[in-house]
Image (cartoon, grey):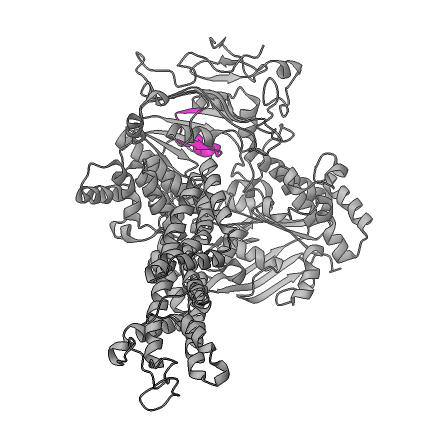
Amino acid sequence: MSAPGTPVLQVTDLDVDIKLRSSVVHAVQGVSLEVGEGETVGIVGESGCGKSTLGLALAGLLPSNTAVRGSIRLGDREVAGLRERDLRRVRGTEVGIVFQDPMTSLNPTQRIGVQVGEALRVQRGASKAEAQAAAADMLNLVGLPRPNEQLDRFPHELSGGMRQRVVIAAALICRPRLLIADEPTTALDVTTQAQILELFGHLRETLGMATLLITHDMGVVAGHADRVFVMYAGREAEIGRTAEIFDTPRHRYTAALLDSVLRLETPRRSELATIPGRPPDLTVSTAGCPFVPRCPAASDQCSAELPPVSGEGRHHWRCYHPADQAEGTLSAAEAPR
Amino acid sequence: MTAHPTASDPAAAGPPSAGPAAAPLLSLVNVTKHYRGGGVLSRSAAPVQAVSGVSLEIAAGTTLGIVGESGCGKSTLGRMVVGLEKPTDGEVRLRGAALATMTRAERRVARYDVQMMFQDPYAALNPRMTLARIIEEPLRAKGGMSRQQRRTLVRQLAGETGLAVSQLDRYPRELSGGQRQRVGLARALATSPALIVADEPVSALDVSVRSQILNLMTALQAEHQLSYLMVSHDLTVIHYLADYIAVMYLGTIVESGPPGQIFGAPAHHYTRALIDAVPEPVPGRTGPASAIRGELPSASAPPSGCRFRTRCPAATALCAQQEPALRDFGAGHRAACHFPLTEPQAEVAS
Amino acid sequence: MSIENVTAVLSGDEPGGIGEAEASGGWLWLRSFTGNRLAVAGLVVVVVLTLFSFVGPLFYHTDQIHTRIGMETLPPGSGHPLGTDDVGYDQLGRLMVAGQTTLEVAFGAAAVAVIVGVAWGAVAGYLGGFVDALMMRIVDALLAIPALLLLLYLATVFRPNVLMLIVVVGLTAWLVPARLVRAEALTLRSREYVLAAKTMGVRTPTLIVRHIVTNSIGTILVNATFQVADAILVVAALSFLGLGIAPPATNWGAMLSNGLNYSYSGYWWLVYPPGIAIVVTVVAFNLIGDGLRDAFGLDTRRQ
């Protein structure tokens, strides 16, 4: 057990390179991040920003054509660079993982009870009976009706929402200190999504685990994360408490992203704010800030050198020309299209 | 005993018409699609009731938004409008003329008036065709234009949808999701349709790209006097784009009306739950606890009476016995519920 | 991006913001293929053997019509780099001529098999339902007939020439591509771009060719190369059993069969050259097929 006050997860200067046939993709570059006990940190960004790769790296699930540099500490223990054997022990006991698609996360040929209890049997040497009992408890905790009956059913007999609950139960059976959830509700209906998000909240209170919630949905993060980490082009753009990020975004990307999110309050048929251009090619390393080609406030300094981390308290960003409180966020009229 | 929650009155569910009734561009009259259950060897013969008794109208130049979750039948409805599926009952009428009564030749011509934009930008374009060929394909199928004329039109469409002419010789694989959706839109516009059915056109796109495509769709609608049938599970998109909204659940329309009414004063419990479930990008706001319980029933065995009753917090015995009729809440707002959240004005004549 | 998308990106299949500067998408497979050394080696071998068979005789003239008693079974030596066969033909020249027939029949039969099979399978898979069931039951029924026995029978009934052999071998081989393409068609017909084409009013035959067949081209090409290899072996087997083309025409199988009569006499030059030619050609086509399969990303096990 690590000393109290030690963060559950501490990532320092993490780089992940993916080797493809003729190029190398710098999927994650210099990411540092901390997750405290029982805290929920949301990792947001759009496609290609590296958030899923980051999630895989933290779960120790990167394929063999990747190279990882930097440090990942779970409690006291350094996890980056561990061999598969040791990683396997970490996964399931210290870290639970929930993926996006409940259809493919469960083995269609195995009964639910077996799959939920699997980690207990493999990692803690529990007997079949013990594992089944624990599985039933867990299924009850995640809100499945009549958990004892569900143990013998197969995944295809359950709906998407129920399957996702099963996946969550399986991930948490060994009571890990950290749960990594990669787009856990994206494949679900919006009403089911609301139920699953409520479940996450409930589990946080009951089990006290820390959560890393990886998503592209700003609304999900707003309601369910304590802190938010915004990624762009493999790098950290901004990190801070949820209220800080939403109310006073500093990095230009964060501001632009928040501006372009469609809300129920957005006036109907108004001209929507967009971010012109496309995310950069991650096979090419750039010296400066990756957002330069799309940023309305970019200067030569921005292209020359990556901005250092600046910030107040626990709110940090990498931007030479942050959006500040006086000018507020970019208005739709200002935002280039 | 069971009253069908639709009206035989052709102005069943649609925006209140301004002025003397001109035939709406598209009307669905009691459209039903039931798939035969299982195959030859299947045990259960219960038909899958994908769509049951839907009546809707779309006027020229307006957007009808259909919102609902998985299994509600909205995609099937979209496909019937475009002609990819034929209703098992009821009629799809284009400018007053039922598609089913048209000759093959007439139907071919009608086709060009209604086109479709697909959800998945990665699957909507043939990966082995250049963009130019993709956009050109409907023109070749329609015929009547020379190669040169087609090429000119393709370039024009590309410009209108924000694609660079230089990209026309590229393949879909080289484009981003947003660019591919632009190609999809250009292709849908090629035959100058009056109506475009857009099935989840922005759901697969990044947030910042969504706004680009929505801006484009709004602009094109004004420019070409287009109508949209927008099918989506995303309430924010429907709210943004639709002039009239229909909420579907398990194959039926549970509520319909203008956006102000639907979002401001929803009458049906399911609509309320949908709105409550939308995660708002406001820090700390988790939204009201979800009032609906349970799981979506099977479409081959929908609940008796009101289909939503198994999950509705306000359901009573009456709801199981009698299917609620569509009631009028004023200003084109209709809902089918025995215990609606607001006061109805009248029963819609059935 | 979900995990699935990420793994797709990690294996280089999707752009998704990570741009691999590739040539235009239509010819991506060609670049992948040319990077595969074994596959290219196979292609080179095939090209060399084709040139050897068809162009060789223009430079190396031998009389392949008239037998020359008195010159039989001469070992490799002056004037005859590979010796002569049992009726006095120059063996090297014979190898070339035989190669022409072998390759003609092999390519021709593969072409017939692929064209008939693709058409059958694409139509069956796309139309689905009763038509599909009927068409595939016919395929199943025909598959139950042992091809070799059928060919043997046909070979005894019709005295085979090149064209006959092409048709006959092709018509027993089309069943496999039919099945393969039908499977592809079943998957492809619900793709959104196919639905889009339907809404545009594209006529069914055009749709099948433009959308279904072109997107199965990977499977088709791979199978075509294996068809060629198989055809060579089938013709060799037929000739081996004495039911090949009438002399003075010949093919490698016939040469091999003939040569084996003399294997105990130590006339190795009658046996090895045709045998090696067959093996090398078949292996080469298999390598090409494997290379194509990798280039099109069809073999998911490889990853």
Q: Residue at x 69, y 65 (%)?
A: A86
For residue B136, what is the image quadrant?
top left
Q: Which residues are magenta?
A: B231-245
Residue B219: horizontal and vertical position, in percent?
Answer: 30, 35
In this rendering, the answer to whether A30 lies above or below B248 is below
Drawn side of residue C42 relative to residue A160, left or right: left
- Does the magenta segment cover residue B14? no
In this rendering, the answer to whether B199 lies above or below C72 is above
Q: Can residue A298 be seen in the rendering of this structure? A: no
Residue at the front extreme of this rendering: C69
Front-most of residues A303 and C189:
C189
- Does the magenta segment cover residue B240? yes
Q: Can residue C89 be seen in the rendering of this structure? A: yes
Q: How many marks?
A: 0
Front-most of residues C13 and C200:
C200
Residue A286: horizontal and vertical position, in percent?
Answer: 40, 64
In this rendering, the answer to whether A108 lies above or below C222 is above
Residue A45: horizontal and vertical position, in percent?
Answer: 49, 50
Residue C33: horizontal and vertical position, in percent?
Answer: 40, 66
For residue C40, what is the image quadrant?
bottom left
Residue at the bottom extreme of this rendering: C78
Drawn side of residue C18 relative to residue A60, left or right: left
